[in-house]
Amino acid sequence: MTRHTWVRLDNASNIFLAARSEADPKVFRLSAEMDHLIDPSLLQEALDITYERYPLYHAVLRSGIFWYYLQDSDLSPVVTVDYEHTCAPIYQPDRRTLLFRVVYFRKRIILEIFHALSDGTGALWFLTDLVIEYTRLRYPDEFTQLDTESDVSGRSVSETAEQEHGLTVDSFAKYFRKPSRKVTDSAAQFAGHAAPVISGILARDLSSSDKLNAPIRSPHSSGRKIYRVKGTRTPDNRTRAVELTMPVSQVLALARAEGVSLTIYLTALFFEAIRLSSGGLGEANTLTASVPVNLRQFFPSTSPRNFFATTRVEHTYGEGKDDFTTICQELEAQFREKVTPQALEAKLRRFIRLERMPALRIVPRILKDVVLGLGNRTNNRGLTVAISNLGLVRLPEPADSHLGRMLLQVSAARPQFCSVSHAGMLAVCFTSPFTELGHVKEFVRMLTSQQVEVTMAVARVTEEELVGAGP
Amino acid sequence: MKHCPDCSVDIEGEWTSCPLCGAPLSGTSTPSPLPAIPLSFSRRRVFRVLFFISLAVILASFLAQLLLSHGSRGIGTLRSVWLGVSAMWLVVMMAFRKRRNIAKGTVYLVVLISLVCVYWDYLTGWHRWSVTYAVPAVCTFSIIALMIATWAMHVEVDEHVVYSGLTVLFGLVPIVFVIFKWVTTPLPSAGCVLLSVIALLYLQATKWPDVRHELGKRLHL
């Protein structure tokens, strides 16, 4: 018998297990829309090839006495048509099942992942490889010999790469556990062969590192009441998903006119949409947004495991100027201050130190789950919305030209959006545990009133909507 | 594509009114990129509630026995029926709950059944039938059952080895009963301990690296 390799679950991932709930199973979905209807048998073939390249994706999640751990398995993923709602639960305690699924619907290839396994960037690598393999099988004539031999996205399929996609690399431990001098050494050495494929801000709300935010929370948030969106839960606790697609150039022009980045522009727009749809914020006039930051852009890593931190930006209405430009500038300034390698490193070091404290290490896992869960709940009280921008995605040709928009959705404990740009189209996907779409309506109307051409798709969640869908 | 004149947005899929504002739409519909998934309801919550209610009822009925007089006279056969039903319910529930890992389930059952037997014996006047016969028998047969089950069901070593080890270690406990002279006849305990020692030696000889590997994983700090 071969003994399965295993690795302790990394730092950020533990929180996903503690914080998952029926409405928010901590699953995210990354979809790629092709220019033709998907051929399931070719997709299965492509998946088998890609799966071989990512040992991490073979992992099942198991629980030890003190920690969760990922363990290698002999399971094989099977492609199915999309028969479950967006971000349906994946991880089931006590069952050894894979922590991701690949499904298809019409023109879309969809990858859904339990967040403890990987983050948005890691998922994007997997989906990119999958799409390239699929295109290679679908349009063999378009691929030259050279393309067939070299690995996707320019990375070489060396043994090291295999290792880095594997179970062993926990980038948190790598960068933030050792003394800083060593870190810079290993960072420099690592940077040599680890070209970061995607930079930009990545996928995911989440709260793990938000706790760490507390000490450096901007002083003027203290004592402010933070607005939290309330609403009607969907009948079967599924995620309410709305997809907005628009030309990225049009929105980028609007962001540039305000002199801020696309992420900040969309966040400011989201704040306004929440305020307009709230029917008056009342006393709770501070809006906050959790924004994840891809740590790979500062600390190069090719590990597909979770490697991000979250920061928080906020705006209080009714104190000083509340016009759109001011909000944009304020958010941009907060973001710039928090997202620097130094600020992030200091924050994560504190967190890792806490995690490595001997007294805390011997706390049984069940208790850790309870404490983390409570911490997460407290933290949620300080958040109005969450946003995340995976940034601009580009695939190598000829796969790129067969791929239309790409979309990212995350199961949500609060209204949230995730955005990705590809093929000149920006997809902004709203998710929420509530059926109400007031904030999306305001968001859309603000964009369309500025002549942005927005296309929308809404997943049906209520009984009335599903009846309307016909047989 | 459908169009909402009020929101100035194009809408994919077959909608007759705008999902955002409810206004009637113009244009022709295009296929939705998202499937319409029927509502589903999870039975998990029902099961969870049932489990905790059952557990509470069983615990309460075990504790209630303490209020009744001890010894065989007490409430007589009624007590046996009551305890029997509660114990059966508990065993079935735990066996069902832990059905996904036969070895883990066995450990749970050995502990639960042994405790129930000892308690039952205590309630009915401490004739020591539990420590003399019941507990050694449960331990002995759980070891045999586990050996058969792991072999017949092709359970992977890493999945069962820790729990098998635990079951075998429980099999050594009856030696305590003999030493403290809690038993009326030492034969069942002796048999149980002997089997456990053999099983332990076997485990050590063949599966020791697996045991160490598994323990290292599960007890990782």
Image (cartoon, grey):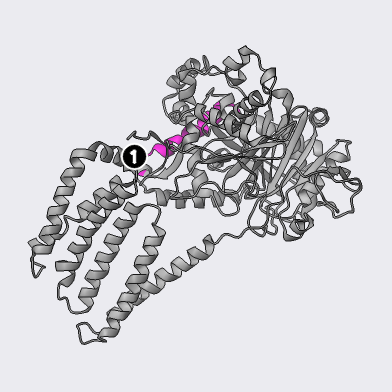
Stretch of the chain drawn in magenta: A340-359
Query: Would you name the residue on which mark 1 appears?
Result: B217
Of the pair B88 and A164, the residue shown nearer to us? B88
**Residue shown at 31% from the left, 49% from the top:** B152
Image quarter of residue A217: top right
Q: In terms of secondary structure, what is the magenta stretch mainly?
A: helix
Of the pair B187 and A317, the residue shown nearer to us? B187
**Residue shown at 14% from the left, 48% from the top:** B198
Give the x, y percent position of residue A9. 44, 38
Of the pair A289 and B114, the residue shown nearer to us? B114
Of the pair A22 and A179, the residue shown nearer to us? A22
For residue A351: magenta?
yes
Q: Is residue B29 left or right of residue B40?
A: right
Give the x, y percent position of residue B81. 31, 80
Q: Is residue A216 left or right of residue A38?
A: left
Quadrant containing the N terminus of chain B in the rendered view: top right
Regarding residue B221, the answer to whether it shows in the image is no
